[in-house]
Amino acid sequence: MADTAVTARVRTAAAGQVPLWARIVVPIALGIAFLALWELACHALEIPKFVLPAPSLIGKSLVDDLPTLLPSLWNTLKVTLAAFAVALVLGVAFAILFSQSIVFEISLFPYAVILQVTPIVSVAPLILIWVGLDHIERALLILATIVAFFPILSNTTLGLKSVDHNLRNLFDLYHASRWQRLWELQFPSALPYLLGGMKISGGLSLIGAVVAEFVAGSGNGTGLAWRIIESGNRLNIPRMFAALVLMSILGIVIFFGLSALQTLLLRKWHESAVGREN
Amino acid sequence: MDAITGGLHPVAPPPEQRRVRPLIELRGVSKVYQGGTVALSDVDLTIGHGEFVSLLGPSGCGKSTLLRLIAGLGAVTAGSIEWPQASYDASGEPSRDLGFVFQEPTLMPWATVWNNVYLPLKLAGVRRRAAADRVADALAMVGLEKFAQSYPRQLSGGMKMRVSIARALVVRPRLLLMDEPFAALDEITRFRLNNDLLELWQSQKWTVVFVTHSVFESVYLSQRIVVMSARPGRIIGDLAIDAPFPRGEAFRTSTTYNEFCRLTSSELHRAMAAGGEDEEHG
């Protein structure tokens, strides 16, 4: 009897059936333990606060500097969301274009790859010069868009082509128009791929926005990246950490937001989002 | 070749057995694929209104290709496929009124059963409300009224195939083309679907062309079995299965059924031998 119980428990664990509360509580407990250790270490070893501030100090800075940090967070958020939206629209539009005409695909895809593989940091000064230093926010938007664009383009292109062969024949059989085929068949087939691309691009647009701001690096920038540079220059390390915390929170919110969207759209039918009991 | 097989085999039923109005006439149909593979060679076949015809043959004999050509999926390399009584639509295409059932259920996983069955009507521009009765009828025919709002992944293999059949029926086809539809199902499910199909065929008066590689299934279902050989695909036998409908378990266990199976098996054997010979020559 005991054997059976053990086997059952092992099987449950092996199947990944960790209860939800454990998935939430365990990482939080670990985080708290880590912070406590950090706090203790800072005090016990008397580490100077401009090298490694204690978590309590970072928390204090987060609260005290919120009036300065919040507008910066808002600016970074604006650039990130705008870049993500533009990348989404352009990526899907070009993917549709590619799926409709092989000529477009073979002539344009290599340039999309070049755009993707060229490090954004190296392009940034050029873009800054082109749009002019008076319009840094435009340069940030362009740079972040370039970074976020490719995963959406390549995933959606792949998805639009990954249509079941027999379904394609079925649509032929009933004389589906090009538009019907795109909207009723290719687009739903591509949706899981598109959502996967969006998840990558969401994080990349934040990275793009921050990196671009670092490169732009003039006093005009007022995003979180600028706060980090500024705090670094003034050796205000607790505030630097506070800005980092806000940036991480932003990234986490974007990731979970897009994951929730993915689950919402796919939960009824796609293997990735369907709950299974076996 | 004829000398080897002798005169034992009925090559074509006497004309008087098939004095039905022709629905489709294939004359000298050949299909050569781009790589040079000859899928079909000089196929002559007339299918009459209301017939239940099986295309039987080893894999690679082009029976699926033939079915697809009849459906208008792909063009013939030589020969013609005619629909003597079909009206022609604006684009010059014969209005074929056909339903096609693939070997796999081929359902859209993102759509409910109802929406999957509605698809052919939707593509034809029929509004949801106008289509509701026809979709309901089609679902009722295959016994899936209660599953209209389910998603394909929630259904068993047999039920998915029923949805696929309902989708073919929703256009009220005159001709139902089925490409090994039950091959992937277990035997019990297959028997049940065989019976359901025969019942529907008798009540709805369609013409059915049914591709299979199962001797037993073809004998059980058909009025006529067209036997094909491989490389290149061509028709080498045309058997009439002259047994009354409705057919049921009594027929499946009868000596008549056995006799037809034996006859069909030897025809199929001959088809396979013919294919092998061709391979050596080619």
Image (tube, coloured by chain):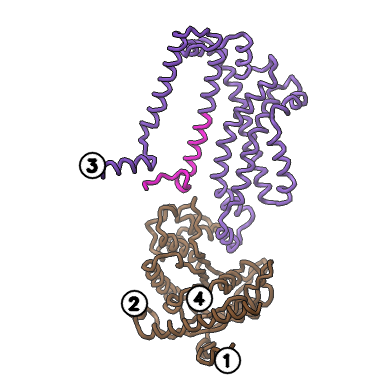
Chain colours: A purple, B brown
Q: Position of residue B119 (x, y in %)?
A: 52, 58
Count residues near mark 3 (Cα–Cα under 10 Å), then give few for <14, some for 14-19, many for 20+. few
Q: Which residue is mark 1?
A: B3
Mark 2 or 4, closer to the camera: 2
Query: On the same chain: label 3 and label 1?
Result: no
What chain does mark 3 sit on? A
Q: Position of residue A169 (x, y in %)?
A: 58, 61
Q: Residue at x 34, y 43 (%)?
A: A11
**Amino acid at pointer 1:** Ala
**Amino acid at pointer 2:** Glu
Please state the extent of the stretch shown in magenta in the rendering.
Answer: A253-278
Answer above or below: position of B252 versus B37. below
Count residues near mark 2 (Cα–Cα under 10 Å), then give few for <14, some for 14-19, many for 20+. few
Q: Is residue A255 magenta?
A: yes
Q: Which residue is mark 4?
A: B207
Query: On the same chain: label 2 and label 4?
Result: yes
In the drawing, what numbered circle is on residue A2?
Answer: 3
CA distance separating discs 3 and 4: 63 Å
Q: Residue at x 51, y 54 (%)?
A: B108
What chain does mark 2 sit on? B
Q: Which residue is mark 2?
A: B249
Work out whether residue B130 can be spotted: no
What chain does mark 1 sit on? B
Going from N to C along the chain, the mark reached first, 4 or 1, is 1
CA distance separating discs 4 and 1: 35 Å
Q: Residue at x 60, y 28 (%)?
A: A206
